[in-house]
Amino acid sequence: MTRVALPELGEGIKSAIVSYWYFKEGDKVTEKDDLVELATDKATFNLPSPCSGTLVEIFYREGDTVNIGEALANIEES
Amino acid sequence: MRFAISDLGLIDFGKAWYIQREAHREVRDNSSLNRLFFCRHYPVITLGRLARQDNILITEEQLKEKGISCYRIERAGDVTYHGPGQLTAYPVFNLNYFKKDIRWFLRQLEEVVIRLLSDFKIIAARKPGLTGVWVGEDKITSIGITVKNWVTYHGISTVVKKADLDNFGLIRPCGMDIGITSLETVLAKDIAMEEVKEKLAVKFRQVFN
């Protein structure tokens, strides 16, 4: 299982808001596909999928705030 | 870092959006390339990813009657208006070769505009927590970007002409009750768009080289 965590986005940024999921739970994802988009300040940031597999669990929904380092989702590698 | 500047002139928002996405792919896949687009738009209202539709204060039909198009896009921020009296700049920059720091990039964009306005003897400033460039209590430059694979697109828009201010009354800019101003308003005289564009190019090179 691969844990997808919110990476460092820059100095002083402690959290971001989930603004868009490109996939839903159960969907197949491919490495480097846009997985989730986050918003902070006046920027949206796209997080690509770190591996190919099935998106088994999403921990934060659109509109939720997530802290840097926290898990956004789990992907079961294929 | 080097970047090539292209002037798209007066262009439909949708076309410029497409051009940026194409450029984004090129810049992402070519480490030696960054692009900066200057343009002006036909009247358009754009809604950022988390924008509230009710921050547009008139109906879709009324927008049509006024010839204003409307797009929901992937940049951050709420609702904004663009018209031909604004100078819009879209940096498609690979932050892997500048600095992988979103706030740093936003502050650099503000710095470009603060220096630009300083050339016109306008004292402009940042407001803590409110990305953009302000003259007194009024916003003169709006900023909203997207970062994909650490390559940016969308960008900044500075109101040059006073005539563009009227249509801001149709929205709650950035979802807030704020005033918007223009170079022409602050200086109480008309300013040629070409002059602003030339100076903006110089400032981008100063700040990002």
Image: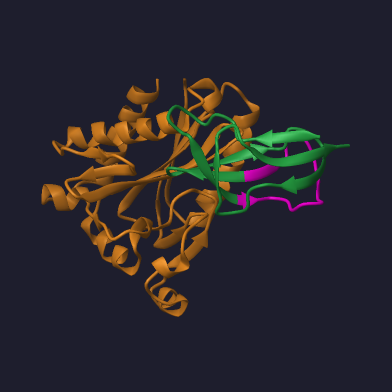
Chain colours: A green, B orange
Q: Which residues are magenta?
A: A20-36
Is A42 left, or right, of B124 in this rendering?
Answer: right
Residue drawn at (33%, 58%) of the image: B176
Task: Specify the quadrant of the image occupied by residue B115.
Answer: top left
Whether residue B178 is situated above or below residue B96 in the rendered picture: below
- Asked whether residue B190 is in view, the answer is no
Task: Say whether residue A24 is magenta.
Answer: yes
Q: Which residue is more in the foreground, B192 or A4?
A: A4
Whether residue A75 is situated above or below residue B176 in the rendered picture: above
Task: Say whether residue B59 is magenta.
Answer: no
Q: Position of residue B120 (x, y in %)?
A: 17, 37
Residue drawn at (43%, 56%) of the image: B78
Whether residue B178 is situated above or below residue A30 in the rendered picture: below
Q: Position of residue A47 (x, y in %)?
A: 63, 38
Whether residue A69 is situated above or below residue A41 in the rendered picture: above
- Toward the left, the furthest residue is B188
- Asked whether residue A78 is in view, the answer is yes
Q: Position of residue B56 (x, y in %)?
A: 40, 68
Q: Position of residue B35 (x, y in %)?
A: 50, 32
Is B57 left, or right, of A63 in this rendering?
Answer: left
